[in-house]
Amino acid sequence: MRLFYQQKVIGKKSRKLQKIPFSIEEPVTTLQELLVQLVTQQVQQYNDKKVDTPLHLYLTDQQIEDAAQHGKVHFGEKKNDTLQSVDQAISTMLQAFQDELFLVLHNEDSLDSLTTPLTLQEDDVFTFIKLTMLAGRIW
């Protein structure tokens, strides 16, 4: 089943939300199962990314323009060659959700619990909003 996700960091006004497709292979019934599958896919994609330097060290004007819209112009290379642990990433994600460091929206509905039952349809959109802590002092 094909789904989409989009990410938003509060305070970054220039970033447009872009729908990124992902697919799930196993049926999911809860938010936790969906998040575990998504994190597993992301870690596998990261680990599969090559560490090699590119053959060409230039970007086209179109690539620069596209990257600038996302807020970061880079060659796409990976600087770290260590493989990331899927289990550690899942544990970190679950702890971050429990600590309310990010919000999850399913289409327009907020999901507040990992045990929230999901009814998924093709092309549903999940939005992840990373929350940032405010700096300051309480007088």
Image (spheres, helix red, strand yellow):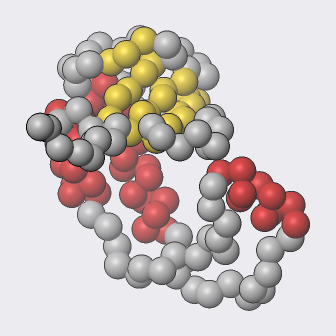
Point out residue 72 in the picture as x, y percentages from the top left corner: 62, 61
Q: Which residue appears farthest toward the front when viewing the image?
A: 139
User: Which of the two residues, 16 or 110, is positioned nearer the viewer here?
Assistant: 16
Does residue 45 show up?
Answer: yes
Total count of labels? 0
Is residue 139 found left or right of 92 in the rendered image?
Answer: left
Q: Is residue 124 above or below residue 45?
A: above
- Seen at 17% across and 33% down, the residue is 98
Q: From the image, which quarter does the C terminus lie in? A: top left
Q: Which residue appears farthest toward the right when viewing the image?
A: 61
- Seen at 78% across and 64% down, the residue is 64
- Seen at 45% across and 19% down, the residue is 106
Is residue 86 found left or right of 128 in the rendered image?
Answer: left
- Seen at 33% across and 42% down, the residue is 132
User: Which of the two residues, 73 or 40, is positioned nearer the viewer here?
Assistant: 73
Q: Is residue 94 above or below residue 62?
A: above
Q: From the image, which quarter does the N terminus lie in? A: top right
Is residue 59 found left or right of 120 in the rendered image?
Answer: right
Point out residue 68 in the picture as x, y percentages from the top left corner: 72, 57
Point out residue 105 in the picture as x, y percentages from the top left corner: 42, 21
**In which quadrant of the rendered view does residue 86 lie?**
bottom left
Does residue 25 show up?
Answer: no
User: Which of the two residues, 54 or 69, is positioned nearer the viewer here?
Assistant: 69
